[in-house]
Image (tube, grey):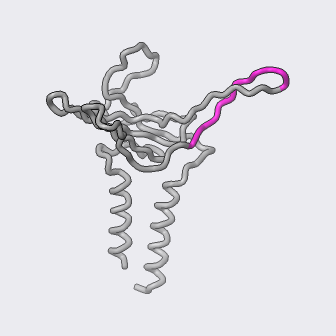
Amino acid sequence: MSEGYYFNLISAVMCFVLLQSIPNAEATIRCYKCLATLPTFYTNETIRLCKDFDYSDKFIVDCPYSTYCTKKFTTANIPTTINGTERDCASQKQVIQNYKNGRWQQEVEIEEPYQPGCHKVDDKGTRTSTIENCYCNYDLCNSATTATTGFLTALFTTVIVYAIV
């Protein structure tokens, strides 16, 4: 095959990967939502436990105040190791008060404090647990069972590019 064909294929793959990482501020993102344990307070929301997570529609929620999905991995060593995973819309909603036309009005802003990827919480050794937060910005991106979602996407893309060349 011609060299131009390979260049076009590589360009298409790279464009796809880049487009996946650009948040769409106009559209509502959809994320998987589940909790590691039952909440300690009453809520009128449907409770979905991650131990029952099966990628079905019952775990999908719209996130009108988010442009990112999140996944949190927790590992506690007390005295045996306990692992937990939670999935949800990233917390980005900021309610502010603005003074307009002689009165205070509530307004909602969507903050953008996150970057795609995972990071461990540095608690300076004060806990017996470790927490890793992962953020991603396309529909249902918080589905993976491990923290390697971004790594696997990058690895898969690299393998395809080098396999073609």
Q: From the viewer's perspective, is 127 left or right of 102? A: left
Q: Which residue lies furthest to the top in this view?
A: 42
- Can see residue 55? no
Query: Residue 55, position in %: x, y?
Result: 35, 39
Q: Which residue lies furthest to the right in this view?
A: 101
Query: Residue 68, position in %: x, y?
Result: 50, 42
- Name the foreground residue: 34 vs 107: 107
Q: Which residue lies furthest to the left in this view?
A: 80
How many numbered circles does the render carry?
A: 0
Bounds of the magenta segment = 101-112
Q: In which quarter of the image is the C terminus?
A: bottom left
Image quadrant assignment for residue 125: top left
Residue sitting at x 44%, y 16%: 43
Image quadrant assignment for residue 152: bottom left
Up the image or down, 52 lies above or below 103; here it is below
Image quadrant assignment for residue 144: top left
Magenta-colored segment: predominant secondary structure: strand
Query: Residue 83, position in %: x, y?
Result: 24, 34
Query: Residue 82, position in %: x, y?
Result: 21, 32
Up the image or down, 103 lies above or below 69; here it is above
Residue sitting at x 47%, y 45%: 139
- Name the foreground residue: 124 vs 160: 124
Up the image or down, 72 lies above or below 11; here it is above
Up the image or down, 16 lies above or below 147; here it is below
- Name the foreground residue: 160 vs 65: 65
